[in-house]
Image (cartoon, coloured by chain):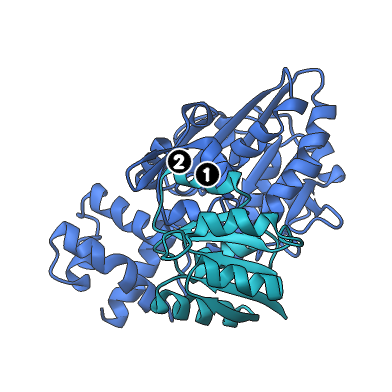
């Protein structure tokens, strides 16, 4: 891979997925894309990159984006967010949604499904407290390949041993040889959908709780700000946002404020949400033409902010 | 420093486990079968036990049953670590008082995850 090929690949990934590769990530490209060349029959990385130009097939472009953006995931990754879910978010929702008895949860970078299923397991464990409530869990990811795995809910022995307590394995999985599959009732709790966070997602509706962990780290500052501000618009003022351990809103946006003593947990800032336009009036559901929705581009956000 | 007793009839497994656990700041002692492990526990109860199932003289399950009957035998956190990977074996181990269960092959990530699970780290 020559420097100009690497430069081309960087631009390609940035525009298609928002992924920002720094200059010293050649090793990452090699480790992710060399296996792709074997599957696609390209003789080396240069040949693969040459096929990503304007005449390249969409299928190949998607394969490359998916290979570069797929992340490793564990059940109950980092633990704390799930403690916050059971001890803080869920009790708050049980009180605040006592009328509608409906709680919507969105895992915005669901990867191979461990996070939505972990939330589902928390809800099953707390079933005694949640009588009559309906929980909708939506898992989205940019990669259709990982979503397919997520939907099947089949994991290797290795995957079910990192983060998943053994009692939960017995309770919520059935064994199929060396593999373990999530129980039907848990699989039925989660809906899956392919989604690129760079594109408009207002059509998904409002979510009480959004998990958006370990995905913003791949974007540049403007894109992070743009996504966070659009997430805030999908959320009621008493909603919760969960970010990854290495992520923060601080210095990016005023749309969210940290929940004290809850690392990684944020709520819409009151002043920010009271002035927002009601949902559904900002941009109608429509397939975005380019990778970035111009109505939600950082430049537009800035313009709107200036005009108050 | 917490103390972990590694019980396995394979010296290779004991060595691998020792290296991982020492990196996690545990002091280690080893036993080759359940009987040796029980003798060691009667002398002094460890904080944790990493326990194989199939061993000569006394197997892991029999050891666990005897350990839990000992005075102070409810203290050590016991993590099975075995090639037995079916639901029946796992359920039997949990009923006998195992705190966690590792299906071999294992690696550093799995040991760390399971030790974290039971509150050892």
Residue A103 percent across, percent down from the top left: 70, 28
Give the residue at mark 2. B88
Q: Residue at x 74, y 26 (%)?
A: A128
Residue B70 percent across, percent down from the top left: 71, 59
Check chain identity for marks 2 and 1: say if they share one: yes
Res A266 seen here: yes
Q: Between A242 and B3, which is closer to the camera in this rendering?
A: B3
Res A110 seen here: no
Q: According to the rendering, which colour does chain A have? A: blue
Residue A132 percent across, percent down from the top left: 72, 17
Residue A293 percent across, percent down from the top left: 51, 44
Q: Residues within 10 Å of mark 2 (few under 14, many from 20)?
A: few
Q: Which chain is disc 2 placed on? A: B
Q: Which chain is disc 1 placed on? A: B
Residue A85 appears left or right of A18 = right
Q: According to the rendering, which colour does chain B have? A: cyan
Q: Between B13 and A5, which is closer to the camera in this rendering?
A: B13
Q: Are marks 2 and 1 in contact (CB under 8 Å)?
A: yes
Q: Residue at x 59, y 34 (%)?
A: A202
Give the residue at mark 1. B92
Residue A57 appears left or right of A248 = left
Picture layout, residue A200 above or below residue A297? above
Residue B15 appears left or right of A92 = left
Q: Residue at x 58, y 42 (%)?
A: A168
Q: CA distance from mark 2 to mark 1?
A: 6 Å
Question: Helix or strand or loop: what does disc 1 sit on?
Answer: helix
Q: Between B110 and A60, which is closer to the camera in this rendering?
A: B110
Picture layout, residue A184 above or below residue B87? above
Q: Can you tell which mark lies on residue A284? A: none
Quadrant the N terminus of chain A occupies: bottom left
């Amino acid at each position: 891979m020559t420097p100009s090929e690497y430069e081309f690949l960087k631009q390609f990934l940035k525009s298609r997925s928002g992924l920002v590769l720094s200059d010293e990530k050649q090793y990452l490209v090699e480790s992710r894309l060399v296996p792709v060349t074997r599957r696609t029959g390209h003789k080396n990385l240069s040949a693969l990159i040459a096929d990503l130009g304007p005449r390249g097939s969409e299928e190949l472009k998607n394969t490359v984006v998916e290979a570069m953006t797929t992340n490793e995931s564990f059940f109950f990754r980092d633990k704390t967010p799930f403690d916050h879910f059971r001890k803080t978010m869920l009790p708050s929702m049980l009180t605040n949604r006592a009328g509608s008895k409906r709680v919507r949860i969105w895992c915005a970078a669901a990867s191979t499904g461990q996070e939505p299923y972990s939330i589902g397991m928390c809800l099953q464990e707390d079933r005694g407290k949640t009588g009559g409530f309906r929980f909708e869990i939506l898992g989205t990811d940019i990669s259709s390949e990982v979503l397919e795995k997520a939907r099947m809910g089949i994991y290797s022995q290795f995957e079910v041993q990192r983060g998943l307590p053994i009692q939960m394995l017995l309770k919520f999985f059935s064994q199929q040889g060396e593999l373990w599959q999530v129980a039907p009732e848990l699989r039925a709790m989660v809906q899956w959908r392919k989604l690129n966070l760079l594109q408009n997602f207002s059509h998904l509706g409002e979510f009480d709780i959004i998990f958006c962990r370990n995905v913003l780290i791949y974007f540049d500052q403007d894109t992070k700000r743009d996504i966070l501000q659009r997430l805030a618009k999908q959320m009621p003022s008493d909603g919760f946002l969960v970010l990854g351990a290495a992520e923060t809103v601080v210095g990016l946006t005023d749309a969210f404020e940290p929940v004290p003593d809850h690392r990684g947990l944020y709520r819409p800032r009151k002043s920010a949400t009271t002035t927002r336009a009601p949902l559904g009036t900002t941009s109608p559901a429509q397939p975005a033409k380019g990778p970035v929705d111009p109505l939600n581009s950082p430049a537009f956000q800035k313009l709107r902010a200036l005009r108050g | 420093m917490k103390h972990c007793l590694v019980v396995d009839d394979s010296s290779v497994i004991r060595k691998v486990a020792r290296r991982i656990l020492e990196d996690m700041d545990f002091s280690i002692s080893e036993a080759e079968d359940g009987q040796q492990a029980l003798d060691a526990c009667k002398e002094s109860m460890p904080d944790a036990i990493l326990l194989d199932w199939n061993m000569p003289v006394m197997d892991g399950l029999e050891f666990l049953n005897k350990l839990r009957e000992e005075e102070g035998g409810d203290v050590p956190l016991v993590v099975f670590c075995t090639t037995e990977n079916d639901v029946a074996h796992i359920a039997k181990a949990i009923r006998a008082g195992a705190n966690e269960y590792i299906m071999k092959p294992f690696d550093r990530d799995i040991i760390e995850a399971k030790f974290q699970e039971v509150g050892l780290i």
